[in-house]
Image: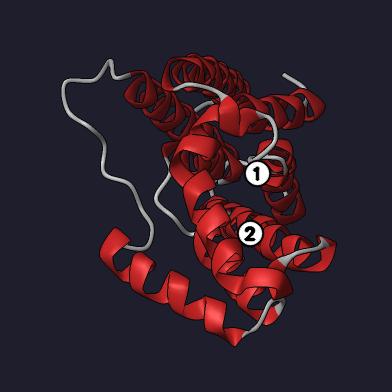
Amino acid sequence: MDVEIDYTLAFMAGILGSGHCVGMCGSLVSACFVRMGEAGKGAVPAMAYHGSRVAIYVLVGFVAAALGLALVSTGIVGKVQGILQIVAGLIVILLGLDILGLLPRRLPLIGIPMAVFGKYYFAAVSKGPVRGAAMAGLMNGLMPCALTLAVAVKASAAPQVWQGGLLMLAFGLGTLPSMLFVSFVLGRLGAQARGWLLKAAALVVIALGVATLMQGLRFFWVMKNLANW
């Protein structure tokens, strides 16, 4: 599968995960700006919030890709890269199944513990409409989220560090419409509609995982034949 299609799938996962974003983060975003009052109105605080949130996604993509490349650079490049893509694909598929509720046990998520998150998230509001919004957005980007984690795992198999960041950027941009217009459009969706959107996003995540798995298997097979492993 071409890299461009991976970006498209990541963007679609963000778009289709809009209902999940609204359900999980919409009330937080609304509460953040309500607490800021008149000072929190306008485009600048919103840009600060969502700009920093998406920036965290990009940073996570860079770090994930860098860690993946560090493994690849251990010497047996082709073999390690193929194995990394296979493992990443399997994990992404599992995360997609977890979102759908098809696993016997929920998978642990990586992120800020919710008790800690709540305390410091609303404390950031007192830092001003721009600085406070940016700080809250940074924390929002670190919230435990299966969709975000799935795309980050995919980013770990990126052939270049910048491509890992770009993959997470595509995902972050996909989440922007719902997060920016949460009070006007998707915020009016019921729980059932949000659930269907989340299921659609999970299917896209699984497709991304399957594509990564197949890429890894093909790459591993080619390198195995070339190197006579």
Q: Please name the residue shown 50% across and 66% down the image.
A: 139
Asked if marks 2 and 1 touch (Cβ < 8 Å), the reply is yes
Q: Is residue 117 left or right of residue 149?
A: left
Q: How many labels, in total?
A: 2
Between 174 and 214, which is closer to the camera in this rendering?
174
Residue 227 seen in this snapshot: no
CA gap, disc 2 and disc 1: 11 Å
What secondary structure is found at the residue carrying circle 2?
helix
Tell me which label, 2 or 1, sits earlier in the chain.
2
Compared to 123, does 67 lie above or below?
above
Q: Residues within 10 Å of mark 1 (few under 14, many from 20)?
A: many
Return the x and y of residue 86 as percentages of the image width and height: 47, 28
Residue 32 seen in this snapshot: yes
Picture quadrant of residue 14: top right
Single out the residue that lies furthest toward the left. Answer: 104
* Residue located beneath label 2 in the image: 53
Between 192 and 13, which is closer to the camera in this rendering?
192
Return the x and y of residue 88 as percentages of the image width and height: 47, 35
* Label annotation for residue 218: none
Compared to 26, does 193 lie above or below?
above
Q: Please name the residue shown 68% across and 25% down the image.
A: 12
* Residue located beneath label 1 in the image: 179
Picture quadrant of residue 103: top left
Amino acid, disc 1: Met
